[in-house]
Image: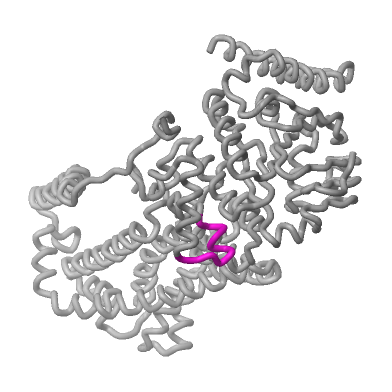
Amino acid sequence: MSLATLEPGFVSAPKASPVTRVVRQVRDQAPAIVVFVAVIGLWEAVVSALNLQQFVLPRPSEIATAFVAELPVLQKAAGATLYEALGGLVIGVSAGVLTAFAVSRWGRVRDIVLPIAVGASAIPIIAAAPIMSNWFGILNPFAKMAIVILLTFFPMLVNVARGLSQVDESAVELMRASAASEGQILRKVRIPNALPYFFTALKICTTLSLIGAVIAEYFGGANDVLGRVIVQSSSRLRFDITWAAIVVVAATGIVLYLAVVVVERVVIPWHASQRAGGS
Amino acid sequence: MTVQGKSVVSVLGVNKVFESAGGRTTALEGIDLAIGPGEFVSLIGPSGCGKSTLLRVIGDLTSPTSGTVTVNGKTARQARQDRDYGIVFQAPVLFDWRSVQANVALPLEVKGVSGADRQRRVQAMLELVELKDFARHYPYQLSGGMQQRVSIARALALEPSILLMDEPFGALDEMTRERMNAEVQRIWQQTGTTVVFVTHSIPEAVFLSSKVVVMSPRPGRIVRVIDVDLPRPRNDDTRETARYFELITEVRETLRGRWSGEGAAKASGAATSVASMERTQAEGAVG
């Protein structure tokens, strides 16, 4: 008899058909959907019952109407804001990752870069936004991207640097015993080890990128962006449009986040967070 | 002790001192050891006797403070660069992101063995450890014993002349451990690799070894080298022979003789390992 059959603790890989997986996902999400719909219904009912004015709290149906009426404006604004957010995200994340490699490779670089990065991350973005507009021009989308870079660089740097350096010492020794070069250890141990850290940071950064872009837009610039739509509609007391714009921001953020989750699932299916019971 | 001639590993006058904020610790003092080709040598002793440090010095994972280590006629550093070693730690240290076969293939990838050669070698190794059917599984899908077998397959992938094993079965339950001991003996006989095996289990050392190196702590020294003349292949019946018990007693007496009257902490350490040995004997008698 082979030893494998004798040993307990073997778990076979879960193999569900696509249909059962979709059914299972819907079932898992059902409570959240029910609660969400209930809250919207309650909101509509309470506002109607108390006869609240539109500028205090618009009804969900009013927000929906505004959304449909302002769709062309919102669409254009969402595109422009997304451009700023994604542009800043790509630059901030790339810079964070590259710096993380340098920091984990050379102690000297770490000692110089980390204090500066910590300092930069402590800058309130509200304070930085007017400066960036001044530097790059108020109509230049890069002024907004700069804020997003400032927000996303640090979480990415810290997480990836940790993933690259907090490696099982025995794993490195095993590689050394096979006479592996530093480059091989980097490719075969450190980078795979850093991937879960990278995705954790990327999820944080996608959310931050939209927040950063919208806040940066508050301080002026082109009008066809979500931040300006929010500022201008609320100054005209058209809170139904304000809410509609907020919904667009939130929905965009959720879509970006889910996109990262999907990529993460494809790239690191082996990680504990991706297995049964993980989120 | 002769260290010339046919030794695969020869350790001469090795000392290892660790310097720390708390002071100096002499982990190894005056170690001389010769290991011949195809020998199975166990290093045994209580915690702090330097047995793992000695293994790491042989494998060039740490350098001795003084003394020399010669492996296959080369320095330990050169031997490591020539990929003369395979290493198995107490934890399997498998890479989560690699399937079983990809884990076994890792040293081959590092060496630059590619394509069909690599595939053939991985298959042979998985057959050797009887995990052929699990090639595409991931580490988390395996039990502890199976993971450790993958780790052994990986260590042997480059056909190293020396296999270094640092308490490889310390984390396994007694039953699994005994099965793994039989496995290791079979693999050792099939491959002819020289094995250096660190353990704190007396029965395990006696069952597996051709030589048991008994060490004592503070400073880490070799007390005695005991030759184990039990016939091979050894099996469950071997565990019930008089000679097996004699040898176990001999190792135990050597460990205890060193400690008698040397303080409560050490005495309790001795008591623990005796107790664990007697438990194993009891199980052997029942089975």
Residue B178 picture location, percent across and down? 57, 26
Residue B86 in the figure: left or right of residue B137: right
Color encoding of the figure: one colour
Q: Nearer the viewer, residue A173 or A107?
A: A173
At x 27%, y 83%, the residue is A223
Where residue A195 appears, x then y in whole percent? 46, 60
Where A142 falls versus A44 (above or below)?
Answer: below
* Left or right: B153 as drawn, with respect to A239: right
- Is B114 in the magenta? yes
Compared with residue A105, is residue B36 higher up or lower down, i.e. above or below? above
Q: Residue B96: x, y in percent?
A: 47, 50
Q: Could you tell me what secondary structure mostly forms the magenta stretch?
A: helix
The quarter holding residue A162 reads bottom right
Total marks shown come to 0
Q: The N terminus of chain A lies in which quarter of the figure? A: top left
> Is A10 covered by the magenta stretch?
no
Task: Please state which of residues A194 and B122 is positioned toward the viewer in this rendering.
Answer: B122
Residue B257 seen in the current view: yes
Q: B112 or B278: which is nearer to us?
A: B112
Q: Residue at x 51, y 52 (%)?
A: B104
What residue sits 59% from the left and 14% below the top? B284
Q: Which residues are magenta?
A: B105-115
Residue A39 visible in this rendered orientation of the protein: no
Q: Residue at x 43, y 58 (%)?
A: A200
Q: In front here: A123 or B121?
A: B121
